[in-house]
């Protein structure tokens, strides 16, 4: 299907108005192919968030903190940042490689920078909003499954003492949830291998292979990046970075707020409770996205939805100290749970902002470099995400000396 225009400049509107799109005929989505792409979207939240319910408990039991619970945030933030560090090192090259060899081979090795390109190639301007509105559904499912796996399967020797009796499960209490998440991803890879069809036409990637080798010189890479970085792409990526930076700070801080003792500013929840809260939120995001996201996008347009989602971070972050104050004053009662519920409702608005920004990036990219453009956007986001969770952990819970060292590095 057609994706984006090849000629884009500062005067070119990236998207038509919502009213104009409502009058046109909508192309049906290729259900099987989009469905497989959504399955692949599950992989990232499952693997990245499975550790959230138990990461603070894990770090708290390590000798590295020396019994000082205030250092938990420092090392938990460092561990969570490693996911985005490895993503930042590889995403751009995965995306560029997929423009040359096809999407499917690269997708089976590394998804980042490829899955959004696949959605862009499976859709056109009439149905792209519907397809990208489904991405939060898949993400929400992963956000639901990941924390539930992490919270339910951690410490199996305590939760299921009659089944997990071997010393191995006592020595490695967090191995089982990690194994389960890896098994889910492996199953999705098998499905993709047998049922997914290549979305990049062979004539395009064969042409690109004939024009250049897979190992470009630094000068060739610099030249190709200059061709990608037109003004609309830069604006779209900058907005994506802003959204993701705030979101990773939220995702890093919220589980820590839930897990830390009340006397240290947290709410004192145990890993299963954290897993159930985050899992319930993920389910709510999925239901909301299925029934309302596409309709809201068509009604208000991408710009309005993105702006509203980004603005929701203001009350979200203001509610966190309010929850802490209520917990210290009255304990974890009705007031705390009310604020937690409001927090999760506002986070629904944040998730709606991702669909519009993915549409903008796809619309601004040259068709021939869609994979590289998405790879570059994800790389840029990953670099900022490394700092997002880690620095915000420090600003709230870490020691000032440690924070200063990290910022200078």
Image (spheres, rainbow, N blue to C red):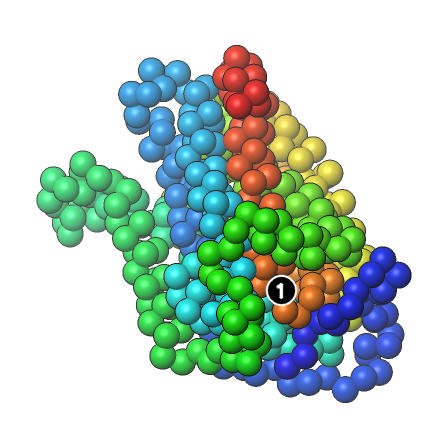
Of 327 and 186, the residue lying toward us: 186
* Residue at the extreme left: 166
Q: Residue at x 46, y 56 (%)?
A: 215
SS at circle 1: helix
Quarter assignment of residue 200 = bottom right
Q: Residue at x 18, y 38 (%)?
A: 170
Is residue 217 shown left or right of residue 352? left
Residue 187 visible in the picture? yes
Residue beneath disc 1: 369
- x and y percentages locating residue 19 in the rendered image: 87, 74
Q: Residue at x 78, y 68 (%)?
A: 7
Of 204 and 115, the residue lying toward us: 204
Residue 292 visible in the picture? no
Quick one: label 1, few (<14), some, or many (20+) residues within 10 Å?
A: many
Is residue 197 shown left or right of residue 392? left
Q: Residue at x 44, y 65 (%)?
A: 106
In the picture, the quarter occupied by the N terminus is bottom right
From this view, report whether residue 376 is shown above or below residue 59.
Answer: below
Of 72 and 218, the residue lying toward us: 218
Is residue 313 shown left or right of residue 185? right
- x and y percentages locating residue 324 in the rendered image: 59, 28
């Amino acid at each position: 299907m057609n994706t984006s225009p090849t000629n884009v400049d500062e005067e070119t509107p990236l998207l038509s108005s919502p009213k104009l799109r409502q009058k046109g005929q909508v192309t049906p989505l290729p259900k099987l192919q989009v469905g497989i792409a959504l399955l692949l979207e599950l992989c990232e939240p499952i693997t990245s968030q499975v550790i959230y319910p138990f990461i603070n408990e894990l770090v708290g039991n390590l000798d590295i903190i020396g019994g000082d619970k205030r250092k938990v945030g420092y090392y938990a933030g460092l561990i969570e940042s490693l996911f985005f560090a490895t993503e930042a090192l590889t995403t751009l090259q995965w995306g560029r490689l997929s423009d040359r060899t096809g999407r499917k081979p690269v997708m089976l090795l590394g998804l980042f920078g490829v899955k959004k390109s696949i959605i862009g190639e499976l859709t056109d301007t009439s149905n792209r909003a519907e397809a990208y509105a489904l991405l939060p559904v898949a993400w929400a499912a992963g956000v639901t499954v990941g924390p539930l796996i992490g919270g339910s399967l951690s410490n199996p020797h305590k939760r299921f003492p009659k089944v997990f009796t071997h010393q191995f499960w006592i020595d490695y209490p967090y191995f089982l949830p990690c194994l389960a998440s890896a098994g889910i991803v492996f199953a999705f890879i098998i499905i993709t291998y047998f049922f997914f069809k290549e979305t990049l036409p062979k004539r395009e990637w064969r042409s690109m292979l004939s024009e250049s080798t897979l190992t470009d010189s630094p000068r060739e890479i610099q030249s190709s990046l200059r061709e990608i970085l037109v003004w609309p792409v830069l604006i779209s990526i900058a907005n994506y970075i802003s959204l993701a930076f705030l979101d990773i700070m939220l995702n890093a801080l919220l589980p820590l707020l839930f897990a830390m003792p009340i006397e240290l500013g947290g709410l004192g929840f145990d890993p299963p409770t954290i897993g159930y809260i985050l899992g319930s939120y993920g389910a709510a995001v999925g239901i909301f996205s299925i029934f309302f996201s596409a309709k809201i996008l068509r009604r208000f347009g991408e710009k309005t939805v993105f702006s509203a989602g980004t603005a929701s971070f203001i009350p979200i972050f203001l509610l966190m100290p309010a929850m802490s104050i209520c917990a210290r004053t009255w304990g974890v009662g009705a007031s705390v749970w009310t604020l937690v519920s409001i927090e999760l409702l506002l986070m629904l608005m944040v998730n709606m902002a991702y669909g519009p920004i993915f549409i903008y990036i796809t619309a601004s990219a040259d068709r021939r470099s869609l994979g590289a453009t998405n790879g570059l956007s994800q790389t840029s986001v990953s670099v900022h995400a490394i700092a997002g969770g880690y620095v915000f952990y420090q600003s709230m819970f870490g020691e000032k000396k440690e924070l200063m060292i990290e910022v200078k590095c």
